[in-house]
Image: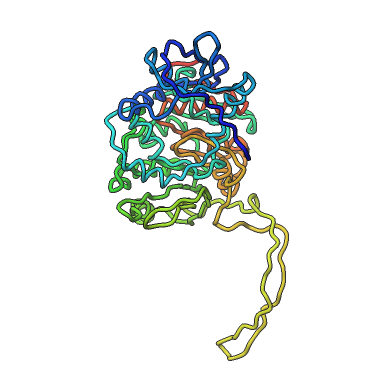
């Protein structure tokens, strides 16, 4: 395919000669601008603004609005483009969305982030948020409507703050409401306020990954060193257990990172501690397959799966009929098999099994053609949906102590369950409420200092 070069020239243009494009639909929160200032201060300009001439001695932006705003009136290097107005509109409508379709190789990014040293708080925070809690490797595994890029704006719009509890009337469970609190799942009083006497039938979460990097300092969250992770997590599991129904299940999705060329053992320690220290029943370990773009490292292969650990107080409610799959599989191949007990032989007949069957504990959900998200600890709605359907009944309570962008609550609503979640960050609480609104729900402040 022949591609035309539409760059006429690259020149320095005074900032007061560059005008924003009235059709620019992207918003630029303060956190993004602060991060841009950080990289400009430490590295400098490594890209050009894209502009088109107006014919009146000035230029209109096609790309680079946030940088142009930061740089103000000082001269900046620009690529002057030869584009028609229709072509400008096409670039504005597709340039960022196409870039957003790219996936992320989380392990490779973590390795890169670990090499970066910066004293700029905004830049360090941005890198830490992307590195500390991984998003799916593939762009098609996440939450389709979580407006993460507007988190700061949504905090202001919803006036979210620590201590608030919001009720969200359910459409699929009439007369009952989901509940979400901006609080700490390690604090007994916070969890008790949130649940308000309700028993949890399924608790599902992806907790923060152990990291020595900063993460959302405004929320009060502090990085957890791997060697301290089990001690830190003790309060989390204790509060879950205190409110878990007798036949309830506790699912933890977490994968250890690599350090000095080897996997850290804190997730193994966490699993063992659940059983030997906290006396949970370790029911199973699921393998969630997360395919993504190829990657390579000097001493290991790309990670394309994550475990989900299943714990319970006792025999857990089990509804496998809700998650059956269609199957058409060959059973046997006509081989002659020796029976070593008596020296004879027997034939394994050829046959097929068709119809409905139970799935295995290797999950291929949300891996292709599913939703996309920008939350740092995102997982597809299909992941908690599987466990909700397989281990609870309609009307049951589903609890996520690290609610993030609200995925578990959305899954609960769609499956006719009640979602209850804790989120430490007021910014992400705003995202959760906006997402619920986009789902057709109407959040209402039930406890706290501010409302709409």
Where does the image place residue 213, in percent across and percent down from the top left? 32, 38
Identity of the residue drawn at 40% across and 19% down: 76
In the image, taking residue 231 as reference, residue 399 lies left or right, namely right
Identity of the residue drawn at 57% across and 24% down: 92
Where does the image place residue 273, in percent across and percent down from the top left? 35, 53
- The answer to which quarter of the image holds residue 243 is top left
In the image, taking residue 5 as reference, residue 282 lies left or right, namely left
In the image, taking residue 208 as reference, residue 355 lies left or right, namely right
Spot the residue most to the front.
9
In the image, taking residue 196 as reference, residue 260 lies left or right, namely left
Is residue 447 among what the camera can see? Answer: no
Is 248 rendered above or below residue 449?
Answer: below
Is 325 rendered above or below residue 51?
Answer: below
Identity of the residue drawn at 39% across and 30% down: 46
Q: How many labels does the image show?
A: 0
Is 340 rendered above or below residue 245?
Answer: below
Identity of the residue drawn at 52% across and 28% down: 147
Residue closer to the observer: 406 or 120: 120
Where does the image place residue 296, in percent across and percent down from the top left? 43, 53
* Quarter of the image with the N terminus in it: top right
Residue closer to the observer: 60 or 102: 60
Indicate how the structure is coloured in the image: rainbow
Is residue 331 among what the camera can see? Answer: yes
- The answer to which quarter of the image holds residue 424 is top left
Where does the image place residue 104, in percent across and percent down from the top left? 48, 42
Spot the residue most to the bottom.
343
């Amino acid at each position: 395919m022949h591609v035309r070069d539409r760059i006429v020239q690259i020149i320095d243009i005074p900032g007061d000669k560059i005008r924003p494009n009235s059709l620019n639909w992207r918003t630029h929160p303060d956190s993004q601008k602060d991060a841009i200032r950080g990289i400009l201060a430490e590295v400098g300009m490594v890209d050009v603004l894209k502009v088109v001439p107006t014919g009146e001695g000035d230029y209109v932006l096609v790309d680079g609005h946030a940088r142009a705003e930061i740089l103000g009136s000082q001269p900046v290097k620009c690529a002057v483009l030869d584009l028609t107005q229709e072509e400008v509109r096409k670039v504005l409508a597709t340039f960022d969305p196409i870039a957003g379709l790219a996936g992320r190789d989380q392990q490779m990014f973590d390795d890169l982030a670990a090499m970066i040293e910066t004293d700029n708080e905004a830049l360090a925070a941005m890198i830490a948020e992307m590195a500390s809690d991984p998003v799916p490797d593939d762009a098609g595994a996440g939450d389709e409507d979580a407006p993460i890029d507007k988190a700061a704006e949504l905090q202001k719009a919803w006036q979210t703050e620590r201590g608030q509890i919001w009720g969200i009337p359910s459409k699929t469970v009439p007369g009952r409401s989901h509940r979400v609190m901006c609080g700490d799942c390690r604090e007994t009083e916070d969890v008790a306020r949130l649940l308000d006497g309700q028993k949890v039938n399924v608790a599902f979460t992806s907790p923060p990954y152990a990291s020595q990097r900063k993460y959302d300092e405004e929320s009060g969250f502090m990085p957890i060193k791997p060697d301290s992770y089990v001690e830190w997590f003790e309060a989390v599991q204790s509060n879950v257990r205190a409110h878990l129904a007798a036949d309830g299940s506790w699912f933890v999705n977490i994968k250890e990172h690599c350090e000095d060329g080897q996997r850290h053992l804190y997730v193994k320690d966490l699993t063992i501690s659940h059983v030997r220290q906290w006396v949970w029943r370790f029911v199973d370990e699921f393998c969630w397959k997360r395919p993504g773009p190829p990657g390579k490292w000097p001493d290991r292969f790309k990670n394309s799966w994550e475990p989900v650990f299943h714990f319970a107080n006792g025999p857990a409610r089990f509804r496998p009929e809700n998650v059956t799959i269609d199957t058409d599989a060959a059973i046997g191949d006509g081989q002659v098999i020796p029976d070593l007990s008596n020296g004879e032989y027997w034939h394994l007949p050829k046959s097929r099994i068709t119809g409905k069957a139970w799935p295995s504990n290797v999950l291929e959900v949300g891996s292709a053609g599913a939703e996309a998200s920008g939350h740092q600890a995102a997982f597809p709605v299909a992941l908690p949906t599987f466990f909700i359907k397989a281990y609870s009944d309609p009307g049951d309570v589903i609890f996520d102590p690290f609610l993030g962008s609200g995925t578990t609550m959305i899954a609960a609503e769609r499956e006719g369950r009640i979602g209850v979640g804790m989120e430490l960050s007021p910014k992400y609480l705003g995202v959760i409420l906006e997402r619920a609104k986009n789902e057709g729900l109407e959040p209402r402040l039930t406890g706290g200092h501010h409302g709409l």
